Image (cartoon, rainbow, N blue to C red):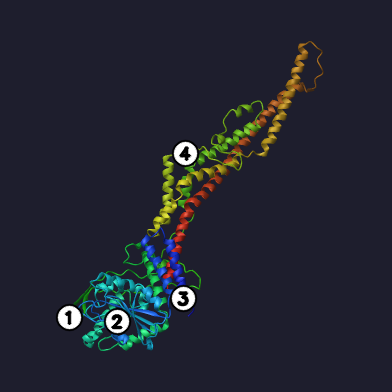
């Protein structure tokens, strides 16, 4: 009981809103005529719900000679329509109204000008339409039948013993209207022409044909408009449907379900639909299996049965479990016992690794990482080397500046890394195609094409974004470690000591050259202090420079590893934003579309 209450909470407005959103999601993915037909259903539902809901429009439809007009007169209790069997007698639809006050705008929308008032009785609120023949030789007659069959609230198909198996009515109307079983009556007229056993055989055969059309369980009434047999049962059936005042909503819900079926590619007769979607949703238990084609004939066989191919009856699809009001049903999860599948959820894996690696190669990331290590050593030597020789280092070009990397912080520009080769571009293109193909593997066409296109939708801007990511990420490679400044200051201090020692020795040499008395010179053991200062500072300066170079080599390796990780993360973010995110959005769009189709088609 709880499940039934949940299903009842799904209103017509919910279904129409779901269908409208599904058509918006299908825009650009499915054929334009297909989407526009679904939108027309939503628009038609809006028009009908704004007109009289206290009246139920019932159409009598059938072939030439089936007795529609006779049945129309019998139900009305007065001869309103001309009756004939040799040629089509009904050229334009006409209406009989039981208490039809307020039904004018509805009939104006139907474009039915001929109207007759009938006493109410037990059919109060009924608008009975007598339609032209659906197999008329006049094209205008057939077009009017098609137009009114598409908009009336309740359909009564009037068949006769000779043409009840005619392929025209089954293939053009009954089979496409399989979703409309609850707003349809089938009347076998003219039973006065058959003996009782033949009537029973005809009814049994007719029910089998209806079941094969997907209308298993549709109500079938046997009548004779001439003798009145079966008319009370037909009036009772019409009275029950009209008195509920819900046939219009049930018809609109059936129209929405039929439109959703075609939109999702589940209608076998729709040439513009995607069979892949039908296969997928059948595996999800949302639709019944396909039914084979049927060949019917109106030629009688022995025993009064028409010749036709036998086929199993089509069972209607099982509805998905209901949801609370406002809750969106989702596609059932995959289940090993039934082999169910659902669209792939794109997640990091081998394909993403391949894509990121291809992008790194195309962006010359290995060259940038190598240049980071070299630039670190180059700048370290220039900052901490022996001042006597460090100026030689400045004559060499900086590896990062040569690539236009490591400029002013916060102002990254384009780099000068080598352009990707043809092989690298091909690897990137192949990786992107593989991502799209993998994501669309279990998504039917044309949605799969949209997924593959989404993977390549930002291909034009991918190169610039990768280059900017490399430039932004490599800015950190220009930061100078603090120990460089300390060691540089130490080197200048040692150099100052060396200059002091050299100047002291030069002064002593000048005094000796001028034959002046030598000044007293302090010594360290037997070595004068000026010599100790000169030689010692030179040795210390060179030693500090060598140790600094070793530290710079180790620091360059660490910085290169950090930059490599940061570059990979940046390129991965670009790949996710420009390749994986559009693919995931397209897959989410398709999943949402399936969920909306489930809502519209649920019972």
Quarter assignment of residue 379:
top right
Above or below: residue 274 compared with residue 97: above
* Secondary structure of the residue carrying numbered label 2: strand
Q: To which quarter of the image does residue 74 belong?
A: bottom left
- Residue tagged by mark 2? 187
Query: Are discs 2 and 3 less than 8 Å apart at CB?
Result: no
Between 403 and 224, which is closer to the camera in this rendering? Answer: 224
The front one of 342 and 413 is 413
Kindly report the distance in space between the C-alpha atoms of the residues bearing marks 1 and 3. Answer: 48 Å
Query: Circle 4: is it few (<14), some (14-19), or many (20+) Cα within 10 Å?
Result: few
Count neighbours of disc 2 (C-alpha within 10 A) and say few if under 14, some if 14 to 19, many if 20 or more.
many
Q: Is residue 75 left or right of residue 369?
A: left
SS class, disc 3: helix
Q: Are marks 1 and 3 in contact (CB under 8 Å)?
A: no
Q: Residues within 10 Å of mark 3 (few under 14, many from 20)?
A: some
Q: Which residue was labeled with disc 3? A: 7
């Amino acid at each position: 009981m709880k499940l039934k209450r949940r299903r009842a909470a799904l209103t017509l407005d919910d279904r129409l809103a779901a269908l409208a959103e599904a058509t918006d999601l299908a825009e650009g993915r499915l054929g334009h005529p297909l989407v526009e037909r679904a939108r027309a259903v939503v628009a038609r539902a809006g028009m009908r719900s704004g007109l009289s809901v206290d009246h139920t429009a019932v159409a009598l439809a059938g072939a030439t000679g089936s007795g529609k007009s006779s049945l129309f007169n019998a139900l009305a209790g007065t001869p309103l329509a001309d009756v004939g069997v040799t040629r089509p007698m009904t050229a334009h639809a006409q209406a009989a109204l039981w208490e039809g006050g307020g039904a004018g705008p509805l009939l104006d929308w139907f474009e039915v000008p001929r109207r007759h008032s009938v006493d109410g009785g037990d059919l109060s609120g009924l608008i009975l339409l007598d339609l032209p023949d659906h197999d008329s030789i006049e094209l205008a007659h057939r077009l009017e039948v098609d137009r009114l069959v598409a908009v009336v609230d309740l359909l009564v198909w009037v068949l006769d013993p000779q043409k009840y198996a005619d392929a025209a009515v089954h293939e053009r109307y009954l089979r496409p209207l399989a979703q409309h079983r609850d707003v349809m009556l089938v009347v076998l007229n003219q039973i006065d022409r058959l003996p009782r056993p033949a009537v029973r055989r005809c009814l049994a055969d007719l029910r089998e044909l209806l079941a094969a059309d997907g209308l298993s369980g549709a109500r079938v009434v046997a009548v004779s408009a001439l003798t009145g047999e079966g008319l009370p049962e037909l009036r009772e059936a019409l009275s029950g449907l009209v008195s509920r005042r819900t046939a219009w909503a049930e018809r609109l819900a059936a129209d929405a379900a039929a439109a959703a079926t075609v939109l999702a590619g589940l209608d076998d007769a729709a040439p513009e639909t995607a069979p892949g979607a039908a296969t997928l949703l059948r595996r999800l238990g949302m639709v019944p299996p396909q039914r084979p084609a049927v060949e019917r004939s109106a030629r009688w066989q022995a025993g009064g049965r028409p010749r036709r191919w036998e086929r199993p009856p089509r069972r209607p699809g099982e509805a998905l479990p209901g949801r609370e009001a406002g809750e969106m049903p989702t596609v059932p999860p995959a289940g090993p016992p039934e082999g169910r599948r659902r669209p792939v959820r794109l997640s990091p894996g081998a394909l993403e690794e391949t894509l990121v690696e291809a992008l790194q190669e195309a962006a010359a990331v290995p060259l940038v990482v190598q240049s980071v290590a070299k630039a670190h050593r180059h700048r370290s030597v220039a900052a901490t080397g022996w001042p006597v020789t460090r100026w030689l280092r400045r004559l060499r070009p900086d590896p990062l500046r040569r690539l236009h990397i490591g400029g002013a912080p916060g102002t990254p520009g384009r780099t000068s890394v080598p352009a990707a080769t043809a092989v690298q571009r091909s690897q990137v293109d192949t990786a992107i195609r593989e991502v799209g193909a993998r994501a669309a593997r279990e998504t039917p066409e044309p949605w799969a094409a949209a997924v593959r296109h989404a993977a390549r939708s930002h291909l034009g801007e991918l190169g610039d974004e990768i280059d900017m990511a490399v430039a932004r990420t490599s800015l950190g490679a220009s930061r100078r470690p603090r120990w460089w400044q300390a060691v540089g200051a130490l080197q200048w201090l040692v150099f100052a000591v060396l200059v002091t020692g050299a100047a002291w020795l030069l002064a002593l040499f000048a005094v000796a050259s001028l034959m002046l008395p030598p000044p007293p010179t302090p010594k360290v053991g037997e070595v004068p202090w000026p010599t100790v200062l000169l030689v010692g500072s030179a040795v210390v300066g060179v030693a500090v420079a060598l140790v600094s170079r070793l530290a710079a080599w180790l620091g360059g390796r660490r910085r290169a590893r950090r930059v490599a990780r940061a570059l990979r993360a940046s390129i991965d973010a670009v790949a996710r934003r420009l390749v994986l995110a559009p693919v995931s959005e397209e897959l989410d769009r398709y999943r949402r579309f399936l969920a909306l189709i489930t809502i519209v088609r649920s019972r």
